[in-house]
């Protein structure tokens, strides 16, 4: 997705300086900044969760990573619970 973002001249000048010293494009710097901001917000939100909510979130992430085409029989499932 392509978005236009209005940035004031002072901030744009600072971005140009950072861009030239870091050897990165302004786009790459902004992408890093946004990703860093999002990661910090997610971390803060995660730290505010209680243990039950953290467990639920972990299970949800594991379920999203599961291969939906791979199945096991009911017997195999219950047998693995008792091992």
Image (cartoon, rainbow, N blue to C red):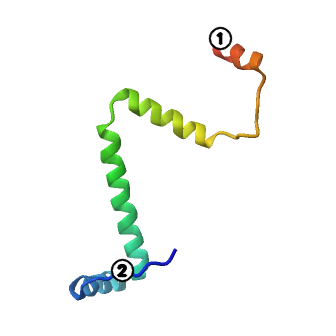
Q: Which residue is tagged 1?
A: 82
Q: Position of residue 26 (x, y in %)?
A: 39, 81
In this picture, is 33 found above or below 22? above
- Secondary structure at badge 1 equals helix
Q: Residue 55's quadrant in the figure?
A: top left
Q: How many neighbours does mark 2 have within 10 angstroms: few (below 14), some (14-19), or many (20 or more)? A: few
Q: Position of residue 57 (x, y in %)?
A: 46, 36
In front of the other: 3 or 55: 3
Q: Residue 79's quadrant in the figure?
A: top right
Q: Nearer the viewer, mark 1 or mark 2?
A: 2
User: Disc 1 versus disc 2: distance between alpha carbons?
Assistant: 56 Å
Which residue is depicted at the point 33% across and 35% down? 49
Q: Are marks 1 and 2 in contact (CB under 8 Å)?
A: no
Badge number at residue 5: 2
- Secondary structure at badge 2 equals loop
Look at the image and tell me in which quarter the C terminus lies. top right
Which residue is depicted at the point 34% across and 47% down? 43
Q: Is residue 18 left or right of residue 67?
A: left
Badge number at residue 4: none
Number of marks in picture: 2
In front of the other: 21 or 28: 28
Q: Is residue 54 left or right of residue 9?
A: right
Q: Is residue 68 left or right of residue 55?
A: right
Q: Residue 52's quadrant in the figure?
A: top left
């Amino acid at each position: 997705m392509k978005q236009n973002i209005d940035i004031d001249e002072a901030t744009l000048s600072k971005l140009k300086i950072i861009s030239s010293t870091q050897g990165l494009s302004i786009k790459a710097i902004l992408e890093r900044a946004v990703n860093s901001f999002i990661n910090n917000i997610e971390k803060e939100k995660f730290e505010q969760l209680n243990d039950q909510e953290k467990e639920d979130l972990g299970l949800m992430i594991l379920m999203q990573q599961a291969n939906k085409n791979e199945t096991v029989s009911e017997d195999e499932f219950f047998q693995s619970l008792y091992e």
